[in-house]
Image (cartoon, rainbow, N blue to C red):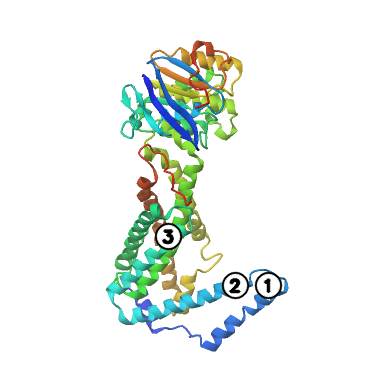
Amino acid sequence: MTPWISVLYCQVMDNAVPIPLWAMLLCYALLLLPAAIAWYFRIPILRRLGVAVLRMTVQLSLVGLALVYLFRWENWWLNLAWVVGMIVFATFSAINNSELDYRRFFLPVLAALGLSSLSILFFFNGVLLDLDNVFSAQYLIVIGGMLLGNALKGIVIGISAFYQQVDQQRQQYRYHLAAGASQWEAIIPFFRYSLKAALNPSIASMATLGVVFLPGMMTGQIIGGSTPDTAIRYQLAIMVVVFVCIALSVGLAIGFSLKRSFDGYGNLRVGVFKE
Amino acid sequence: MEVELQDIRLSLGGQPLFNGLSYTFPAASKTLLYGPSGSGKSTLLRLLLGFVPPDSGCILIDGQLLGVDTVWALRKRTAYVPQGVHLGEGKVADFLEDLFSYQANKHLAPDREAINAYFQQFQLPENTLSKAISQLSGGERQRVAIIAALLLDRELYLLDEATAALDEALQEEVTQHFAGLEGKTVIAVAHQTAAPGFDALDIRTILSGDG
């Protein structure tokens, strides 16, 4: 076992200074400050802020509770089921946040997210970290969540951009079909455009990493007791696999959805977009 | 290439456009379809390219029924100059390169000389190749699309108001050129018949606009 991984194993012991309940309450009390400003200047965000804080608290507490048990039981199929559940949820969320039709895109997006995130996840845990148990909740669920969260954002941008461009640039698309392009040749410019749109945010954040902000994962690991060396290696590795996961999932989602979205003549089908 | 329309019926947005349209364009014919705005001229060309399916009736191109199995091969034998040509972004050279990078067109990739000869014929400056498409005027874009169509050297040419943005001398030059293409079938549509050079084509008014 390499030293930087052994450091991470120690994290299980929870090296971070715990936050007691009164301190959590004090932290939440800080919210009164912006809330008071919002109230005084009648900025209409109070209700939404209240709902968001409540949702965040309840959701994370429930996940925390679930994770406590998942960590305690350490059951491989339960951990895997949890990740699969996250994939399904991410699929709903991705399509919900796009203009695309549920029935047409659910399966392609599910397959794309599942294939890309699971393959990258097992590569990360099994090959890069060389874990004895690749199904360990500590890695499977945590890294899986990280990959899915980012792939989800990428798919929302990428697949929407693709179909919107084909729709908006219909005349250009048809021109190339009429000039003898195959279906694939005619969609390449749109594929290029959508992949660029989906990957640009990751490229931008890679380029500013460390200069503009310290990413959450690294911060968390350092507080948790990892050495900066370990934390940085993890962060770099995560940035790379997240990037690859976005590229794969967007590419696959478009690829898998083509047949359902274009007819035999190469025309975009009616009903690709939400009513 | 013979193009045959058999009893085509089509409604768009609840409005009947073609109500049993039948017509045959003989092989190597040069036809100008005249019709008022909204009579379905552009739609007819899109029908022939498989972009709009008819409600009923069928289209035979060179004896082949236009369908999902044949449309891809037929498009490789057709060149289309659409109305208000949208050629995309980038330079004219990139556009042409894209066009001739397609599997179906690779063997037709033109050399600089062939391109320049057409540029000269249709009065485009030689540096047009290095210009961005967005910098071209409507008439220049139209001529680039016409030249691309000619370089594709197809059996069937579908021209949708292809000379509308050109001056009279060029209108005549372009129309005469297509009229003189030996063995090629040309179907042009226009909302007027009086443009210079149109008398070289077989003018038909099969589209009345009242269904």
Q: Chain of mark 3?
A: A
Q: Chain of mark 2?
A: A
Image side of residue B189 versus residue A128, left or right? right
**Disc nearer the start of the sequence (3/1):** 1
What type is the residue that disc 3 sits on? Answer: Ala
Name the image quarter holding the N terminus of chain A: bottom left
Q: Residue at x 34, y 66 (%)?
A: A84
Circles 2 and 1: CB atoms closer than 8 Å: yes
Image side of residue A130 versus residue A269, left or right? left
Circles 3 and 1: CB atoms closer than 8 Å: no
The answer to which image quadrant residue A66 occupies is: bottom left
Visible in this render: residue B112? no
Q: Secondary structure at mark 2?
A: helix
The answer to which image quadrant residue A26 occupies is: bottom right
Front-lying residue, B100 or B184: B184
Q: Residue at x 48, y 23 (%)?
A: B159
Where B18 falls versus A26 (above or below)? Answer: above
Q: Residue at x 61, y 72 (%)?
A: A47
**Disc nearer the start of the sequence (2/1):** 1
Q: Gap between marks 2 and 1, in whole Å?
A: 10 Å
What type is the residue that disc 2 sits on? Answer: Leu
Q: Which of label 2 and label 3 is nearer to you?
A: 2
Determine crowd level at label 3: few under 14, some 14-19, many 20+ residues with C-alpha closer than 10 A: many
Q: Which residue is mark 3?
A: A151
Are labels 2 and 1 assigned to the same chain? yes
What type is the residue that disc 1 sits on? Answer: Ala
Circles 2 and 3: CB atoms closer than 8 Å: no
Q: Which residue is mark 1?
A: A38
Q: Can you give x and y, in whole percent of width and height, for residue B153 in the image?
A: 40, 21
Which numbered tag is attached to residue A49?
2
Q: Chain of mark 1?
A: A
